[in-house]
Image (cartoon, rainbow, N blue to C red):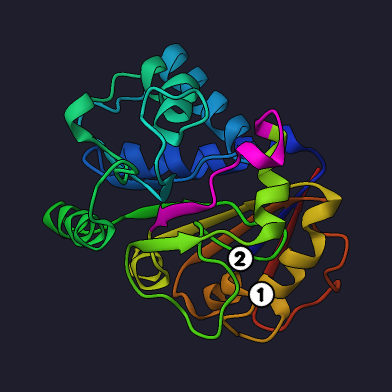
Amino acid sequence: MRLIVTDSYEKMGMEAANIVAGQVYLKPNSVLGLATGSTPVSMYQRLVAVHQSVGLDFSEVTTFNLDEYIGMSPDNPQSYHYFMQENFFRHINIRPENVFLPNGMAEDMVAEGERYEQLIESRGGIDLQVLGIGQNAHIGFNEPDLKFAATTHKVELDEETIQANSRFFKSAAEVPRYAISMGIKTIMMAEHVILLANGRNKAEAVRKAVCGDVTPEAPASILQLHRDVVVIVEREAAALLPPIIRGVNITYKE
């Protein structure tokens, strides 16, 4: 595991964007796993800027998003379909037929999960997966549990997640209670993983992910077992990490 600590949210996004851009440059037909929420926005902004300034080419790239709310149509401004279009896809030259998100409107979520897994497999698997982390250490919408959920599946959101996501809605009552999410196995099968975090409210989750026990009660902790993961955090999110962590290569970026 590599850990990069930056002194600002913007620099966190820049470091992540550099890795994604390098992946696309070296493998133009890369399969990217993407995340939503406020954390990766600066990364998307930087990637858009690189595309517009030097022509970073996304025309052969395929993307798979981690999750979507159940019962929310793609044109709803709170949906992750809408988020990705507004924050990334419509600003770059990616082909619409190469963009995939789980269908939150599917009648059968088990069948939808199987369909999504087959799509990922048909594209050769995910080359680079971008993750955020919840305050309860969830990745995707894999909430703390007694076991690691394997593949794309229906999830009941924890109350902590609902409260955290309520800032995007008029009230917590409007936050969907269910989502469909890639599972832990799907995430761990990616060739490379980037985990992003910013803010003091994520510090405990980052500590659990980087140097806590590997347990389903802290889903992000499973990343300690991944063969190639880079954790990029700004200083507030790194506040509870010890200065030396066994097995972790730590770099500070001013």
Q: Residue 181's quadrant in the figure?
A: bottom left
Q: Is residue 170 magenta?
A: yes
Whether the residues at callouts 2 and 1 have beta carbons within 8 Å, the answer is yes
Q: In percent of the image, x 67 and y 86: which residue is there?
A: 213
Q: In percent of the image, x 48 and y 45: which residue is there?
A: 35
In this rendering, would 22 be left or right of 249? left
* Amino acid under disc 2: Arg
Q: Residue 185's quadrant in the figure?
A: bottom left
Q: Is residue 252 magenta?
A: no
Closer-to-camera residue (163/118): 163
- Near mark 1 (Cα within 10 A), the count class, few <14, some 14-19 or many ≥20, is some
In this rendering, would 123 be left or right of 1? left
Closer-to-camera residue (51/175): 175
- Circle 1 — which element? loop
In the rendered image, the vertical position of residue 160 relative to residue 89, given as above or below: below
- Would residue 249 be seen by someone viewing this image from the given angle? yes
Among numbered discs 2 and 1, the one appearing first in the sequence: 2
Q: Which residue is mark 2?
A: 2
| Spot occupied by residue 138 in the image (x, y as percentages of width and height) | 59, 64
Of the 4 image quadrants, the one containing the C terminus is top right
- Circle 2 — which element? strand
